[in-house]
């Protein structure tokens, strides 16, 4: 190998290594953008789920379709705990009238919202300290939009109160 061939060989190696470095830099810059887009999409889906959970049992077909669309998107990338909480909520919503319990539906909704908050905050490296009863206290009734109704007390809401009362009565 003469000097000219050696220079060509070294130049080719430099070009290949340089292209690899540039490709690596380009891919690293794309990953945070993709993660941010994915996180934004997940938060949008959670917001849509929460917005459509109220009044779902008696909602019109459009409202139900909006919920189901967001639910299907959540099935793709939501953690198992979020999917399980959403499924528990759907089970309470779809019970026959004779078995329907609004407080169980409220508790299931609150649990699902809390799981979505936990997932969203894990993505942001924060943690929620809210309890289910702290989430919200009104439910929009689609049949009577003039006046919201207070959400029914759920077993989850009253559990800390009952535990405190039992502890005080034991003393």
Image: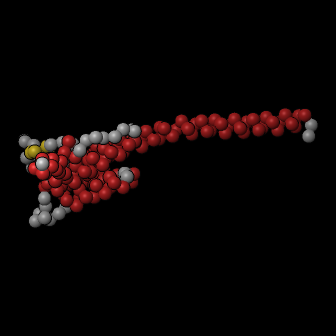
Position of residue 139 measured from the top left corner of the image (x, y, whole percent): 14, 46
Q: Is residue 54 above or below residue 95?
A: above
Position of residue 94 measured from the top left corner of the image (x, y, whole percent): 19, 61
Position of residue 162 measured from the top left corner of the image (x, y, whole percent): 14, 50
Q: Residue at x 83, y 36 (%)?
A: 8
Viewer-nearest residue: 109 or 34: 109
Position of residue 130 measured from the top left corner of the image (x, y, whole percent): 25, 41
Number of labels in the image equals 0
Q: Residue at x 13, y 55 (%)?
A: 102
Furthest residue in direction front, as rendered? 171
Viewer-nearest residue: 9 or 39: 39
Tell me if residue 155 can be seen.
yes
Q: Is residue 108 left or right of residue 22?
A: left
Viewer-nearest residue: 49 or 123: 123
Q: Is residue 134 above or below residue 71?
A: above
Q: How is the image coloured?
A: secondary structure
Q: Quadrant of residue 129?
A: top left
Q: Quadrant of residue 44?
A: top left
Q: Residue at x 26, y 47 (%)?
A: 113
Tell me if residue 51 can be seen.
no
Q: Quadrant of the N terminus?
A: top right
Q: Residue at x 73, y 36 (%)?
A: 15
């Amino acid at each position: 190998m003469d000097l000219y061939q050696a220079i060509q060989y070294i130049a080719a190696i430099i070009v290949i290594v340089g292209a690899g470095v540039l490709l690596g830099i380009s891919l690293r810059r794309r990953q945070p953008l993709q993660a941010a887009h994915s996180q934004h999409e997940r938060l949008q889906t959670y917001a849509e789920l929460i917005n459509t959970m109220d009044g779902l049992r008696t909602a019109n077909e459009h409202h139900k379709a909006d919920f189901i669309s967001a639910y299907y998107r959540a099935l793709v990338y939501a953690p198992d705990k979020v999917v399980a909480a959403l499924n528990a909520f759907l089970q309470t919503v779809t019970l026959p009238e004779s078995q329907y319990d609004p407080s169980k539906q409220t508790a299931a909704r609150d649990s699902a919202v809390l799981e979505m908050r936990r997932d969203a905050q894990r993505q942001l490296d924060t943690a929620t300290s809210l309890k289910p009863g702290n989430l919200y206290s009104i439910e929009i009734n689609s049949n009577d939009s003039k006046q919201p109704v207070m959400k029914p007390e759920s077993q989850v809401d009253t559990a800390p109160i009952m535990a405190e009362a039992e502890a005080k009565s034991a003393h």
